[in-house]
């Protein structure tokens, strides 16, 4: 008789346990998935498969890593993305804004989120009744141990997934890092152990959340597309939100230290710094004052912090609603400038 790897979490497929790691480039989700598969297959004797899906292979771009594990007598021959996961691990909290990140999670499944917020707050945000939600401040652990987010998340995943044995995953981590970075083995094992023991947990009752309506399909398809392939609603970077590209840190402006030299604006790749004209200099050049950062467009590259000559821009941990509370909307500021200019011209 086949071993039940899923317990009560996935009775619909008792011989297969599927995990999906949702992340961005630079947080190590691909390596985490690889370590999970190696631990299950090479050290526990299970059947398994792992692969990742990503685009441009750069920091900040979306990454999905898929892991399937099954008893040794059940051969894993599936090579498609995980659509109905038993466990979803979200390496960056901002990714939760996309409903597709938690798509397929059914009651009895598990959601693990890298966040400084409580599991109850996350559960009430995602509204997945019957799903076990765990919250872990993996960034804080990684900062303290001088490692990366992925090994802390591996600890949380191992503590939650019934198919995984902690010693097997620890051994896989030690083997992986000892090949190139033996000096980091001890720190990463500490990070794993803290992630294993550091989660808060909450489950939203089935009656506590409204029923989410099923998707009715694409708004435009082969039968409803405009003639000639015309795009009636072309895309615009004004609606782009790159906050999910930040890796737990953001630049913060200290206005009293700023001299408005605009060196930061020269190196910013996303034009997320917001300025307000204040007049014209003696030499006839326009003068402006730096108001702040529009964090909707800031991907956290920290180029502005590295080049700021006065230390007015500093790298700070992104905790809670700091981005929203300090954000200076660039288009609101631009609209205000237009209104001021129109009033000055008597229009």
Image: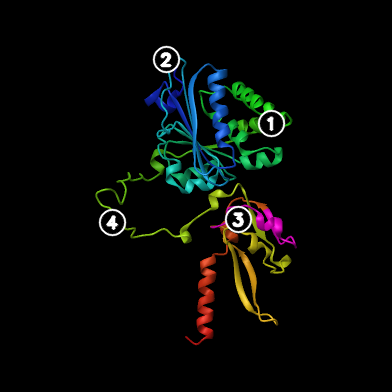
Asked whether the viewer can see residue 159, the reply is no
- Near mark 4 (Cα within 10 A), the count class, few <14, some 14-19 or many ≥20, is few
On screen, residue 257 versus residue 293, left or right, reads right
Locate residue 207: give its quadrant. Answer: top left
Q: Which mark is residue 228?
A: 4
Name the residue carrying label 1.
Answer: 190
Marks 1 and 2 sit apart, C-alpha to C-alpha, by 35 Å
Tell which of 230 and 145 is nearer to you.
230
View extreme (top): residue:
1
In the displayed structure, would residue 338 be above or below residue 243? below
On screen, residue 143 versus residue 110, left or right, reads right
- Near mark 2 (Cα within 10 A), the count class, few <14, some 14-19 or many ≥20, is few
User: Picture coordinates of residue 109 (x, y %)?
Assistant: 44, 32
Name the residue carrying label 2.
Answer: 2
Read off the magenta span: 297-315
In the displayed structure, would residue 59 be above or below residue 256? above
């Amino acid at each position: 008789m086949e071993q039940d790897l899923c317990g009560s979490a996935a009775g619909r497929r008792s011989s297969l346990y599927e995990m999906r790691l949702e992340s961005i480039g630079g947080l190590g989700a691909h390596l985490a998935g690889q370590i999970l598969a190696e631990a299950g297959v090479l050290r526990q004797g299970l059947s398994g498969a792992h692969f990742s899906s990503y685009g441009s292979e750069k920091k900040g771009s979306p990454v999905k890593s898929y892991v399937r594990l099954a008893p040794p007598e059940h051969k894993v021959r599936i090579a498609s993305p995980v659509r109905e996961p038993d466990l979803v691990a979200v390496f960056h909290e901002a990714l939760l804004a996309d409903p597709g990140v938690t798509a397929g999670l059914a009651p009895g499944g598990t959601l693990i989120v890298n966040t400084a917020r409580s599991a109850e707050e996350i559960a009430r945000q995602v509204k997945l009744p019957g799903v076990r939600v765990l919250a872990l401040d993996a960034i804080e652990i990684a900062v303290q141990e001088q490692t990366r987010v992925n090994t802390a998340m591996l600890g949380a995943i191992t503590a939650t997934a019934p198919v995984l044995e902690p010693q097997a995953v620890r051994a896989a981590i030690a083997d992986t890092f000892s090949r190139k970075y033996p000096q980091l083995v001890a720190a990463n094992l500490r990070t794993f152990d803290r992630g294993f023991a550091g989660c808060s947990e909450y489950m939203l009752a089935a009656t506590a959340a409204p029923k989410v309506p099923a998707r009715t399909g694409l708004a435009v398809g082969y039968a409803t597309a405009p003639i000639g392939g015309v795009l009636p609603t072309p895309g615009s970077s004004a609606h782009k939100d790159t906050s999910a590209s930040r890796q737990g840190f953001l630049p913060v402006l200290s206005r009293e230290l700023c001299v408005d030299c605009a060196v930061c604006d020269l190196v910013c790749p996303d034009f997320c710094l917001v300025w307000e004209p204040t007049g014209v200099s003696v030499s006839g050049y326009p003068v402006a004052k730096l108001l702040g950062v529009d964090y909707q467009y800031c991907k956290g590259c920290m180029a502005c912090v590295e080049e700021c000559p006065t230390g007015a821009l500093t790298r700070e941990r992104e905790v809670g609603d700091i981005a929203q509370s300090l954000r200076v909307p660039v288009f609101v500021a631009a609209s205000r400038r237009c209104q001021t200019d129109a009033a000055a011209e008597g229009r």
